[in-house]
Amino acid sequence: DQQVKQNSPSLSVQEGRISILNCDYTNSMFDYFLWYKKYPAEGPTFLISISSIKDKNEDGRFTVFLNKSAKHLSLHIVPSQPGDSAVYFCAASALNDMRFGAGTRLTVKP
Amino acid sequence: KAGVTQTPRYLIKTRGQQVTLSCSPISGHRSVSWYQQTPGQGLQFLFEYFSETQRNKGNFPGRFSGRQFSNSRSEMNVSTLELGDSALYLCASSTLLNTEAFFGQGTRLTVV
C-alpha cells in the first residue's frame, strides 16, 4: 500500500539552481513529515521535518512546504550543490506508524 | 553517542534457508523499526517495536518476524528465504516512532 508517493524517481539540476522534490500522501492521519537523504552504502540520515500544524519549515538551504488540503509536501534546496546528490526519501508518520516514499535520486551537476 | 548498529553488514543465503539480522539502537531509544529497501520500492515498513512489544506491522508475509529484547536490541528473522527477499534491510531507532529516526547502515541480504 503506497500511502506515501514520490512520483519522480530522478531529478537533475544545475549547481546553484533550485531543486524541488515532491511527495504526496493519502492517509489523513499522518501528522508529522520528514525528509531523509541517503548516500550509497549508508543508512538514510534525517534532513528536515515539519509538523502538520505548520505549512513551512526552513533550515539553511533546505525548506519543506506542507499543503495539507492537497496532501502534498515538497522539499526545496536552494542553492543546490554537487554534494546534495543523493537519494531523498520523504516520510509521513502517525502514532506507531512511519511510511516512506520510493525515493527520488537527485543529481546536481557542476 | 554510538549510532544504530546493524549486524552483519552483508549476508549471502540460499533459497529455503532462514536468516536473523540484528539491530542495536541508540542508547535510550526504545522504538526500533525495520524497513526493506529494494530498487524502485523505496523503504517498505516491516514492523516496529517499542518496549519489547510489536506495535505495528507492515504488509509482509508471516515469514518475516521480529522481536525486541529488554535492552531494546532487536532482531529480525526471515524464514524460508526466497530470491525476492534480496534487499537492504534497514533498522531505525527513535525515542518515539513519529519523531526523527536514526538509521543504521543496513544489512545487505542476497538470496541465491
Image: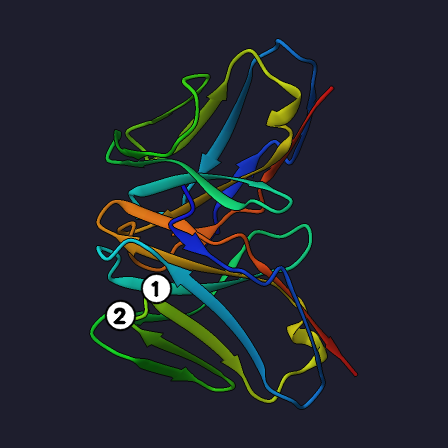
On what subunit does the disc labeled 1 rest? A
* Viewport quadrant of the N terminus of chain B: bottom left
- The residue to which callout 1 is attached is A33
Question: Looking at the picture, which amino acid does disc 1 mark?
Answer: Phe
Residues B44 and A67: in front is A67
Q: In the image, is residue A99 above or below residue B22? A: below
Expressed as whole percent of the image width and height from the top left, the position of residue A54 reads 25, 78
Colour setting:
rainbow
| First-in-chain label (1 vs 2) | 1
Q: In the image, is residue B58 above or below residue B97? A: above
Residue A31 falls left or right of residue A88: left
Question: Looking at the picture, which amino acid does disc 2 mark?
Answer: Ser
Q: Residue at x 62, y 47 (%)?
A: B40
On what subunit does the disc labeled 2 rest? A
Q: In which image quadrant can residue A72 be found?
A: bottom left
Residues B99 and B27: in front is B99
What's the mark number on residue B20? none
Q: In the image, is residue B13 above or below residue A51? A: above
- The residue to which callout 2 is attached is A51
Label 1: few (<14), some (14–19) or many (≥20) C-alpha neighbours in 10 Å: many
Expressed as whole percent of the image width and height from the top left, the position of residue B62 reads 40, 17
Q: In which image quadrant can residue B87 be found?
A: top right
Secondary structure beneath disc 1?
A: strand
Is residue A64 visible in this depiction of the protein? Answer: yes
* Viewport quadrant of the C terminus of chain B: top right
Is residue B26 visible in this depiction of the protein? Answer: no
Cα–Cα span, label 1 and label 2: 6 Å
Expressed as whole percent of the image width and height from the top left, the position of residue A44 reads 54, 56
Q: In which image quadrant can residue A108 be found?
A: bottom right
Expressed as whole percent of the image width and height from the top left, the position of residue A58 reads 39, 84
Q: Are marks 1 and 2 in contact (CB under 8 Å)?
A: yes
Dots 1 and 2 on the same chain: yes
